[in-house]
Image (cartoon, rainbow, N blue to C red):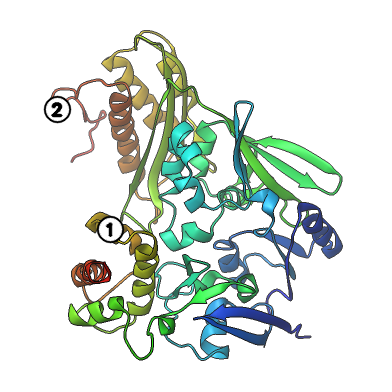
Amino acid sequence: MTHDHTIRMKVNGTLLEARTRPDRTLLDLLRDEFGLTGTKKGCEEGECGACTVIMDGRAVLACLTPALKADGTDITTIEGLEQDGELHPLQKAFLDEGAVQCGYCTPGMILSAKALLDVNPAPTVEQVKEAISGNLCRCTGYTKIVRAIQRAAEEKR
Amino acid sequence: MNWTTYHKASSVSEALSLLERSAGRGRVIAGGTDLVIQLHRRALSAEVLVDITGIDDLKRIEVHEGWILIGAAVTHAEVAANSLIRRHARVLSEGCSRVGSLQIRNMATLLGNVINAQPAADGAVPLTALEAEIRVVSKGAERWIPMEEAYLGVGRSAVDATGELAAQIRFRIPDSDGRAGFFRVSRRKALALPVLNGAVLLRPDAALTRIEKARIALGPVAAKPFRARGTEACLESGPLSLDVIHEAARIAAEEAKPRTSLIRGGERYRREMIRLQMTRLLQDLLAFPDAPAGTEAAPPQGGASR
């Protein structure tokens, strides 16, 4: 017997509502219910960071978050960074610095970076590395990602 | 279908009522970063999840009559950043700041990690050295369990999350003139389980001539965070010297029982690392100058090669 729960949350500034089975994860809700496929499914066990979203101001892993835990919260996904057709400074910097190769880690990486810059607009290199230490990248070797984040921080200041 | 009902409790009594009504088919969920994986793998089951992270009473870190008290909904990130903990019990902040990744620390609670009962949890090892106690509540009953009695075995907690709630953990504020440190050996700096970790709290006398009190916990070298009582006794036994430090480190490597494990590393390596890390940490904390080259990392009999 499916127990349908109604769930309401703010996603990228818009109040969304859905009916969902209770054992869904936030990741599946975002991708399958709301069509927001920017958040990626990597390992589904909290070890890669590809599913990172920002929930109530904190970077969290959507694959380990029950959808119903996120009921009533304020979520930002990668789709929420663009404003009026303009890319966010982080998105621009990642492209300009060549920090995107396959692109799979990129949404999670950018959101971890955004969570950092939202509380620390002038991070040191060590702080940048610490902030993305929960996001694995198999392509870039991280150097350009770190540079992109520093560049975005400078451009925002 | 995995769980069929998800409740966000707004009070401890509501959480307990929900558990009672579920008659063993319900389970407490805090951050969920371990539990969701276990439920997905069917290592654990629950029909009803009772989410306690919205309960205001459980979100507090406070000081009361010489004790620090941390509520069940407090995350590792909150412990790591908390100024009270950083000032009075820095080993705990340090341990908590190394768990998992930033994203995990933002969700995972310190007390949930203790209930998950793994032997090297980076918050649980300092809590063991701090001789912490857990307040467990159920319908009409409350008890305090010392950290060392909270573990029944690897992955098995003395707290039954289907019927009771670990609501709070407390420990006495360490002496302000004490010295404490935390070490961790792991294959990466983040997103890596500890190959070894340890927390050391010392209360030397004012002249640094002897140790009045030593509390040392190590992991993963036993089924639960390990109190190195032999090492403590050695440090407390008499006048302090570099020889005593070396002897204490040797005892630590001997009384701990790291096994050869695919994820934690080989036994001989880990014993040698215990000896090395303890030597360095004790020397550091007690302001002993570095031993002359060659003596600091003196290999054990039958020698591990570098």
- For the residue pair A120 and A112, the one nearer the viewer reads as A120
Q: Secondary structure at mark 1?
A: loop
Which quadrant of the figure contains the C terminus of chain B? top left
Residue A116's spot in the image, x, y percent? 36, 63
Residue at mark 2: chain: B
Image quadrant where residue A39 sits: bottom left
- Give the CA separation, mark 1 to mark 2: 40 Å
Judged left or right of residue B185, residue B7 is right
Identify the residue shown where x is 33% and y is 64%: A132
Residue B283's spot in the image, x, y percent? 28, 24
- Tell if the residue under mark 1 belongs to the same chain as the one under mark 2: no
Image mark count: 2
Identify the residue shown where x is 50% and y is 26%: B174
Residue B238 lies, with reference to residue A74, above or below; the image says above
Identify the residue shown where x is 33% and y is 69%: A136
Judged left or right of residue A33, residue B188 is left
Using a 10 Å C-alpha cutoff, classify the residue at mark 1 as few (fewer than 14 neighbours), some (14 to 19) or many (20 or more). Answer: some
Q: Secondary structure at mark 2?
A: loop
Residue B240's spot in the image, x, y percent? 34, 12
Judged left or right of residue B294, residue A126 is right
- For the residue pair B266 and B68, the one nearer the viewer reads as B68
Residue type highlighted by circle 1: Pro
Identify the residue shown where x is 24% and y is 56%: A124
Query: What residue is shown with label 1?
Result: A123
Q: Is residue A94 visible?
A: yes
The tag on residue B120 is none
Query: What residue is shown with label 2?
Result: B294
Q: Is residue B159 visible?
A: no
Residue A89 lies, with reference to residue B146, above or below; the image says below
Residue at mark 1: chain: A
